[in-house]
Image: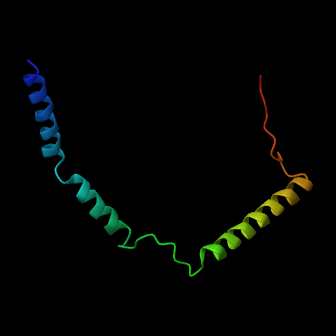
Amino acid sequence: MVFFPFCGFVYLCCLDRIIRGNQREKDRERAQARSGGKAKKNDDGLTPEQRRERDAKALQEKAAKKAAKDAAGGTNAGSKSTKK
C-alpha cells in the first residue's frame, strides 16, 4: 500500500527535474554574460585593520554631519510622527 504513493512522489521529482532541465546553469551563464564576466571582488589593497579604520572614520564623519544638521534645525531631525 505504501509503494504506490512513494512511486508517485519519485515520479513527480523526476518529472520536475526533466522539465527544469539545465535552466539553473543557463541562468548562471546569462548572469555572468550580463556582468561582463567580472566577479565582484573586495580588493582595494588594504589590510583588514586599515579597512576597519577607514570605515570607522567614514562612520564618524557621517555622524558628525548628521549632528551638525540636527543642531542647525534640519527638517524632521530624526523624529517620528505618531498618528492616532
Image quarter where the C terminus lies is top right
Q: Is residue 47 left or right of residue 39?
A: right
Q: Residue 65's x, y, as percent?
A: 82, 62
Residue shown at 17%/40% (left/top)? 16
Q: Is residue 11 left or right of residue 65?
A: left
Residue shown at 39%/73% (left/top)? 38
Q: Nearer the viewer, residue 66 or 76?
A: 66
Residue shown at 60%/78% (left/top)? 47
Q: Residue 9's x, y, as percent?
A: 15, 30
Q: Quadrant of residue 15?
A: top left
Q: Quadrant of residue 66?
A: bottom right
Residue shown at 56%/82% (left/top)? 45
Q: Is residue 81 left or right of residue 53?
A: right
The colour style of the image is rainbow
Q: Residue 29's x, y, as percent?
A: 27, 64
List the single residue furthest toward the front: 2
Q: Nearer the viewer, residue 35 or 47?
A: 47
